[in-house]
Amino acid sequence: MNKKGLAILLRSKMRPLSPASKKVNHVQLAPLDVNKVATQNASSKTPRDFGQVRESMHSVISMNRKEILDTALSEFSEGYFSLSQENRHKLLLILAREYDLNRGQVRELMKQYIGLEIPKVSGDGIDEHGHEVEGHLSAFYRIERNLRHALNPMYAILFERLNTHPGGLKFLSTVRADILSIIADENIASIRALDSYLKEKLITWLSPANLELHQITWDDPASLLEKIVAYEAVHPISNLIDLKRRLGIGRRCFGYIHPAIPGEPLIFIEVALMKNIASTIQEVLWHDPPTPEPEASTALFYSISSTQPGLAGINLGKFLIKRVIHLVKKDMPNISNFATLSPIPGFMQWLLSKLASSERSVPIFSENILQPQEERALLDAYVDSTEGRNGMEVLLHLLTSTNHEWTQSDGLQPILLRLCARYLLHEKKRGKALDSVANFHLQNGAMIGRLNWMADRSEKGLTQSGGIMVNYIYSLEHIEDYAQAYFSTGHIQVSPDVLHYIEAMEKNEDSSCM
């Protein structure tokens, strides 16, 4: 084993592949628990007194001298990392409440502004009395400038100064991750305002113009490759052979890197070059040998992962996918199809919730999501082998059985594919797709292309998506139009292959009413 392989093994604690194994057949190790690692790293630092860290934070906000400010910034960031999670939350509450904007000053400026009389200006800058109006407008300009300043919270100074400090951008990402953990536990208005402001600043600082698109290869440093192993969130990397294959012939990996966080991609995407759009993840991860690149006509995006929890809600993936499409198309003109093979992480949770409603004592909360013929088929096939008074209860018991025995039944395939199509197309949240992955790709301009039965038989794939995966299609000539239609009206572009599930349902519903 070479030095790079050994370094990656030691860093990621990845299990080496057995010499007797010819190929990777299953995931041997889950990704590192990044939050746990961060906590361990923080706890290894010398603990700081909470009062000292709070004082250093105040110093950063109030100081002006640059040489002293740099020291205060370093002391604050080091002190923050040494705090317990409880004390970090306590400090962020203080920041949100005590360093907010001065609303008394804002109200006073607004009163002054409202009290000014707006002069009527002609095209030549002369008012109705024949006087120049520049003198009158100067009061407006002055109060408007003061209002803009007053509407900035005091913690804006902390964020701006940290952003210009070495390591400050990544530190701010950590701070936002802590803010999000508070919001997950408590609905505190001041904390939500703090998060909203920091998120807006991060969106500006992390604009595509400030990001470098880097193709990640086996020749990159071991420290970077270890992060790919640690942060791969969709299909865990099992060993060195698996990692090397994902970076080798017939595969591509691209990441966005910010100059302020060198050697660590903020987000990365894995691409398989194939002859056709894959219908199972096994074709992508374990197909051997890969398609020769000159014969490939499809670029399949099969995993996209963020490395920074604090950047949640900042859609770097949108820009990454579009840039990768154009880069691959430029380098490989033979590639004409761009698609994904994506999980449907919210499907089973939604489905089991719907099915469980049939067991509630209050009928008004229950909706029978099965068609009459599906209900009859379930009762005929399973009523003797499972509990249940109706098709909904029978299906619920089947899907919640141990060891996923239901996957051996071909009779469930048309039912679950239809319900999955309904979930993707009709289940909405604020007018957009309920499923988070679907919403991500649809807002980026993709079309729902094909549902794939038993495409991911892993425990995670069965538990979250019922083993079903979906191909989202990125059509170069339609990306912007599809994205705009989805953004403005929530319209979902869908292929006839998926639409026929919904049309069949509507046809059956109409016939049952006749």
Image: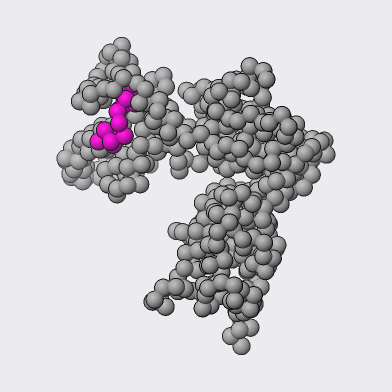
Name which residue lies at 63% across and 29% down: 16
Q: Position of residue 7 (x, y in %)?
A: 58, 20
Q: Position of residue 294 (x, y in %)?
A: 82, 35
Looking at the image, residue 408 lies above or below residue 58: below
Looking at the image, residue 205 lies above or below residue 484: above
Give the left or right position of residue 201, taking residue 486 as reference: left
Name which residue lies at 75% across and 35% down: 22
Residue at far bottom of view: 514
Name which residue lies at 62% across and 40% down: 27
The residue lying toward the viewer, choosing from 289 and 498, is 289
Q: Main secondary structure of the magenta part?
A: helix
The picture quadrant where one finds residue 413 is: bottom right
Q: Quadrant of the C terminus?
A: bottom right
Residue at far top of view: 67
Give the left or right position of residue 152, taking residue 299 as reference: left
The picture quadrant where one finds residue 107 is: top left
Q: Quadrant of the N terminus?
A: top right
Q: Position of residue 18 (x, y in %)?
A: 68, 31
Q: Position of residue 169 (x, y in %)?
A: 42, 27
Q: Does the magenta-highlighted stretch encompass residue 463?
A: no
The residue lying toward the viewer, choosing from 342 and 147, is 342
The residue lying toward the viewer, choosing from 14 and 486, is 14
The picture quadrant where one finds residue 64 is: top left
Q: What segment carries the magenta color?
A: 77-90
Name which residue lies at 59% across and 24% down: 8
The residue lying toward the viewer, choosing from 104 and 19, is 19
The answer, for residue 112, to whether it is visible in the render is: no
Number of numbered discs visible in the structure rendering = 0
What sort of colour scheme is used for the picture?
one colour
The answer, for residue 181, to whether it is visible in the render is: yes
Give the left or right position of residue 394, taking residue 286 as reference: left
